[in-house]
Image (cartoon, coloured by chain):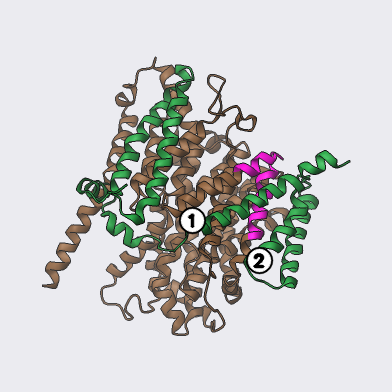
Chain colours: A brown, B green
Amino acid sequence: MFDSLIIGIDNLFSLNSILLLMAGSAVGLLFGAIPGLGGTTAVALMIPLTFGMEPFQAIILMGGIMAATSTGGSVSAILLNTPGIAPNAATTFDGYPLAKQGKAGMAIGAGATASALGGVVGIISLVAVIPIMKEIVLLFTPPEFFMLAIFGLCAIAVSSGDRLLQGLITAIIGLVVGFVGLYDITGTVRYSMGIPLLEDGIKLVPALIGLFAISEMINLAVKGGSIAEDTSSIAISRVSDGIKQVFKNWSTMLVGSGYGTFIGAIPGVGGTVAAFLSYSTQVQRDPDPDIEYGKGNIKGVIAPESANNAKDGGSLIPTLAFGIPGSAETAVFLGVLILHGIEPGQKLLVENEPLVFTLVVALTVSVVFATLVVLALAKYMAMLTMVSVNVLIPTVSVIALVGAYALHTEIGDVVIALIFAIIGYFMIRFNYPRVTFTIALVLGTLTELNFDQTMQIHDGDMTVFLTRWLSVTLLILTVLSLGFPTFRKKVRERNRRREAEASK
Amino acid sequence: MKLIPEHRQPTAWFLLAILLTIVAFIALSYTYKPNDRAFPLMVGYTAIPIILLDFLTLTKTKIGQKISVFFSAKTSEQIDQEADTTERGLGKELVVFLWMGLLVLGIYLFGFLPITPVFVFCWMKYRGAYSVRMSIYSAVSTLAFIYILFEVVLQYELYAGVLMEIFGT
């Protein structure tokens, strides 16, 4: 493991790699700060740039983006009351009141420092579980992998907030789209409708670019208006006070980081839940605060910011170990790994361990780098959110379409990107989660392959899923996850009753 | 459709489109050999009850409300209240789709490099109401960015358009 870490550090510390890391962090900060874009769009948009790169360079670029996004998002959350990305929403509760009190610098300093430290805690946790993951992943054979994929899809659908049915529907559509093209096991071309372009299947890159980058542009165009309000009155000072506050309130940061890492590791739950849970836990832990939460308590910034960055390390645990992405961003990142011939799971952990550590080092350095940039350039970053949608839409759309074309130099891929952009737009429009669609699209082949291998090994006996302990455990977890919304409702009702009784 | 409140009807049409797609998918699956269709059929048939359940949650019926509460812990009304209420309108959407469609058609006919500045300029001038000068600056910057990044740095040969293939040298 130590050797792999040294290789990881060696991979990163060359001029090319450092430039890639800085570029990735800058893109991540930019896309994180501008509401409506976000890390998934950034990762999808940057995929074409990795085509000619070595796998470790692609990983460094993507690591830079993923680590920096939520740090960027905290700036617009604090200064403009507009979270750059959803996980920064909880930061607005106390961050924006602090900015209104003239303490924007302190809030940004605290938010950025908490993000960096939270990110590092998440990454350390990832490193700590790598040896355990290696052992666990060896227990998995085709039936278990199949059940794990099903569990992953259901867990992600459940985590789509109040949209379990919609999440399941989009997961199924993702699987259906994944069936298009050559089926490796039998050599049959399926569902291509005689279109030669589809015979090799729907290509992941144009589909992801359409689904995340162009669909967001269509959505912005239809909704219209400007992204943010006037930033002219923003004054930033006392940043160092914010940094000191994080060290003073270290337990808040550690608890938030713990939540972020743990929740990040559950497929699909993601940074938003981690940040809100961390925030609400902080409020409960501190029943008698000096400054009321929601009115500019600095701990209300530290708690969610440490959680939403720590989740990056956590969400990579299922992604790297089992190829089950923890979030939409890691699903697209998984696409990048596959594109570069890297197969997640046992092979990656055992045979390509240095790549895992390259990612770990890249994430660590970029989270620190992003923080330093935010601390230095917060005011200018806030101005980025003033970019008009009518400048953003045509430029991002054209660049995205060039990206969709570039990998296979097939003009048909541009059409595929457009089709997926329209599908993605309708998913946004009707509140159907794109994350389950994407994860199913990425997992589709793996799921069917493991299903077929199971059937071949066990002579078509479906009961095999019920006779192996790990498979049964995963099945039980799947059923339990589907019952989670009802359980959550009962808990909410009980809490409401208790609150009502307490107020009497 | 009478059972579905008016504001939820677009979602119902969307869901109906998904249902028809799944039915077509199942029908198409039967044209393949048993080994090729086993898992797709499993997925297809699983989709139908889920879609129907989702369809029921859109209705004003008691059963619809119960399903909604069971699967999302909220009634449809509660979900409506929290939904994005931005007025979009089919006309607006069609116009944006048309712009994007024209961009792709333009790329197909003329290639990336000629169509990039034209599209950026037209969008900014006619949709963004920017000045001619500002629109030209943005158009040229985007073209320069794409040319330098993709053609010069990454050395991709960007698509030159079908017209160039027919009439070009």
The residue type indicated by label 1 comes to Leu
Residue at left 39%, top 58%? A274
The quadrant in which the N terminus of chain A is found is: top right
Per the rendered image, the range of residues in magenta is: A394-416
Q: Disc 2 versus disc 1: distance between alpha carbons?
A: 20 Å
* Residue A209 in view: yes
- Secondary structure at badge 1 equals helix
Q: Is residue B102 magenta?
A: no
Front-most of residues A236 and B44: B44
Question: In terms of image quadrants, where is residue A88?
Answer: bottom left
Q: Which mark is residue B90?
A: 1
The disc, 2 or 1, on the residue closer to the chain's N-terminal end is 1
- Secondary structure at badge 2 equals helix
Question: In terms of image quadrants, where is residue A297?
Answer: bottom left
Q: Which residue is mark 2?
A: B126
Front-most of residues B142 and A98: B142
